[in-house]
């Protein structure tokens, strides 16, 4: 493997990593949608699959602008996050599985938010305004996907999972909600 010695190389490495991550997600999201018992969650996964295909196309535009071949660098982080999600898909209890799928999907979104944010910053430093614009568009979509998942969790799915699993919690926590929110909020 070639050593990264310039910001240009680091930026290209980041784009390749994101490209592979998005390609992996285009295969994982349909499985997650199928495993979801909530129609709202299934539709959120299906909608994000369409966006993810757009993310792949934007990354290909960046490769083309750089005169590079659109190839990925194996994203082992995404591979691990998807594996965690696949383990949750095997849960028998529908509402609990949905809560777990949201948690897994938010881990993915937070990873992508970090990756796209860093790549956008590096593109800006390199003076690549076209890449900045494309990466910023995707970054905003990733943040919105995280917000939607968080809303689904907080408005119904986590409460349904709590009730369906027979878990007990204090009335105060259930009435006031969690003390902290996800990093995307």
Image: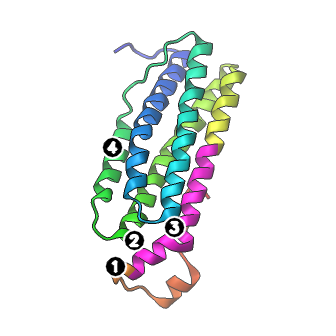
**Secondary structure of residue under mark 4:** helix
The answer to whether 10 appears left or right of 32 in the picture is: right
Front residue of 112 and 157: 157
Of label 3 and label 4, which has the lower sequence position? Answer: 4
Front residue of 39 and 56: 39
**Secondary structure of residue under mark 3:** helix
Where in the figure is residue 47, as x and y percent of width and height? 56, 49
Disc 3 to disc 2, how far (Cα)?
A: 11 Å
In this view, the mark in front (3 or 2)? 2
Of label 3 and label 2, which has the lower sequence position? Answer: 2
For disc 1, the neighbor class at 10 Å (few under 14, some 14 to 19, many from 20) is: few
Quick check: marks 1 and 2 in contact, CB under 8 Å? Answer: yes
The residue at which mark 3 appears reads as 153
The residue at which mark 2 appears reads as 95
Look at the image and say whether residue 113 sits in the magenta stretch.
Answer: no
In this view, the mark in front (3 or 4)? 3
Where in the figure is residue 91, as x and y percent of width and height? 28, 64
Disc 1 to disc 3, how far (Cα)?
A: 15 Å
For disc 2, the neighbor class at 10 Å (few under 14, some 14 to 19, many from 20) is: many
């Amino acid at each position: 493997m070639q050593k990264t010695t310039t910001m240009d190389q680091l930026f290209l490495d980041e784009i390749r990593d994101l490209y592979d991550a998005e390609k992996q997600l285009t295969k994982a999201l349909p499985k997650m949608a199928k495993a979801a018992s909530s129609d709202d969650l299934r539709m959120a996964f299906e909608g994000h699959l369409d966006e993810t295909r757009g993310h792949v196309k934007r990354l290909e535009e960046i490769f083309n602008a750089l005169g590079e071949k659109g190839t990925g660098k194996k994203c082992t982080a995404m591979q691990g996050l998807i594996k965690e999600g696949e383990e949750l898909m095997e849960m028998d209890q529908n509402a609990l599985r949905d809560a777990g799928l949201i948690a897994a999907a938010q881990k993915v979104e937070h990873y992508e938010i970090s990756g796209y944010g860093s790549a956008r910053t590096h593109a800006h430093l390199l003076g690549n305004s076209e890449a900045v614009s494309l990466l910023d568009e995707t970054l905003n979509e990733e943040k919105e996907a995280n917000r939607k998942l968080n809303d689904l969790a907080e408005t119904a799915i986590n409460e349904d999972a709590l009730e369906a699993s027979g878990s007990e919690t204090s009335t105060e926590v259930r009435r006031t909600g969690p003390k902290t929110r996800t990093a995307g909020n």
